[in-house]
Image: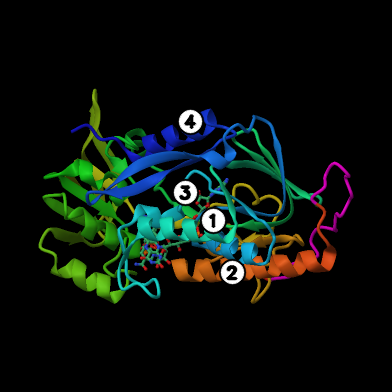
Amino acid sequence: MRPFPRDFRIRAARIFVRRNSGTRTRVGFKPVGGMYISFATNSDSQRGRHMAETRKTKLLIIGSGPAGYTAGVYASRAMLDPILVQGIEPGGQLTTTTEVENWPGDTEVQGPDLMVRMEAHAKAMGTEIIGDIITDLDLSKRPFTAKGDSGTTYVADALVLATGARAKWLGLESEEKFKGFGVSACATCDGFFYRGQEIVVIGGGNTAVEEALFLTNFASKVTLIHRRDELRAEKILIDRLMKNPKIEPLWFHELTEVYGTDSPLGVEGVKVKNTKTGEITDIAAKGVFVAIGHAPANELVKDVLETHMGGYVVTKPDSTETSIPGVFAAGDLTDHKYRQAVTSAGMGCMAALEAERFLAEVGDDVDIDGAKDTSLPLGTGAQVAE
Ligand code: FAD
Ligand code: NAP
């Protein structure tokens, strides 16, 4: 069967959001008969809106992962009438996994289901949820301005940044060439296309181990290629990995090249290097799943907000305040240490409560037509050392 890869779906989703600019378009994945399929829906509440409109709000939340939706719940209950912009991945990273076993209150829940529930919760509390992608942010003065891919401009007195993290890639030319044609960073999205095939997974953290385990549902064999002989993953996952007869770990090896056919474009195998001896060997594989960690999605703010540890947005200790007053950051965007759904949700809560306090102190002014200047000096917020 011809793969219909995630990268392609993301591109398609982006075009879909664009074409439906002004409407409340949702794109994502939903469970159908044990599988997850991509979906897109339009809500009536925004039909008829036009291109290039301006939306004003006391609080704009950017991101629809656990941090964003939790911020939505708390901000709605604080009567801030928040707008939440979902981005290209409605529901965030948990939509790319299956069982989540460490979300309190659920012994086991499917990631995409959990995120659908979080969205419904935020909406029920009063958060306006919009299918759009923020492409540009002006944080030089309040109210802050955010430009949407749909053409909408969002004007907000306070901002919660909850843009999370994105999968890292190895940076190989051949990896780039076969991305979406055999190379993937999402087993849940693309694993189905490799029934009965041999697959390799690169990495040694929770994601790599979970992906390898999940892929055994489809693959005839999964080789887990790791650059060391020790996994970072949780013990319970390592235990499952070691007991799975379809998975073969390959220690002390790095991927050096993905090779395959040009017409049609498709993977046939990989070359790996022994990190101790330098010896190069071939492994036959139709699918390559790269699971070497995630980097903060900081593109919108990396040049204006203080960042550290490889781009994570710096927040004040025990707070979500960033280096710009009125701008709060929550979840994986700021968290280089825990990067869990529950910690992200916790930070989303903190960000909404702190935004509420901030607005109560400095006042809100979403009436940009009146153009009251409420700008505050930059850099008077977080004072955190690297
Ligand atoms: P994310 O979930 O990363 O969401 C970021 C959001 O920001 C997305 O909705 C995206 O569309 C949006 N966004 C980004 N840029 C823009 C933009 N320009 N404009 C608008 N919106 C934007 N954690 C657990 O606790 N348990 C698990 O079992 C678990 N399993 C995992 C399995 C996998 C495969 C992965 C990758 C992660 C897993 N995690 C798990 C980690 C967990 O998913 C993250 O810690 C959590 O999702 C982070 O939440 P977040 O809200 O910070 O951001
Ligand atoms: P991670 O914990 O940072 O692990 C990344 C892995 O990739 C490491 O084993 C690392 O090797 C390897 N790696 C990094 N760069 C590499 C490169 N250039 N070449 C080869 N290997 C490379 O990332 P993650 O597994 O994506 O997890 C991210 C966060 O999400 C973590 O906090 C994790 O706990 C969380 N998460 C949780 C769950 C869960 O709770 N069930 C599931 C998934 C993810 P080294 O070990 O040698 O550094």
Q: Is residue 162 visible?
A: yes
User: Does the residue at mark 3 contact the one at mark 2 (Cβ under 8 Å)?
Assistant: no
- Crowd around label 2: few <14 · some 14–19 · many ≥20 (10 Å): many
Query: Which is nearer the N-term, disc 3 or disc 2?
Result: 3
Q: CA distance from mark 4 to mark 1?
A: 25 Å
Where 92 sits versus 181, above or below?
Answer: below
**Residue ID for mark 1:** 123
Three-letter amino acid code at the position of disc 2: Cys
**Residue ID for mark 4:** 15
Query: Which is nearer the N-term, disc 3 or disc 1?
Result: 3
Location of residue 238 (image quadrant): bottom left
Tell me the tag on residue 90: 3
Of tags 1 and 2, which is closer to the observer?
1
**Residue ID for mark 2:** 349
Residue drawn at the location 41% of the way across and 45% of the way down: 28
Is the distance from the Cβ of mark 3 to the nearest ligand 1 atom less than 8 Å? Answer: yes
Q: Position of residue 265 (x, y in %)?
A: 26, 28
- Crowd around label 1: few <14 · some 14–19 · many ≥20 (10 Å): some
Residue 370 in magenta? Answer: yes
Three-letter amino acid code at the position of disc 1: Lys
Q: Which residues are magenta?
A: 366-384
Where 35 sits versus 343, above or below?
Answer: above
Numbered disc 1: secondary structure? helix
Determine the main secondary structure of the stretch shown in magenta: loop
Q: Foreground residue, 97 or 184?
A: 97
Q: CA distance from mark 4 to mark 2?
A: 32 Å
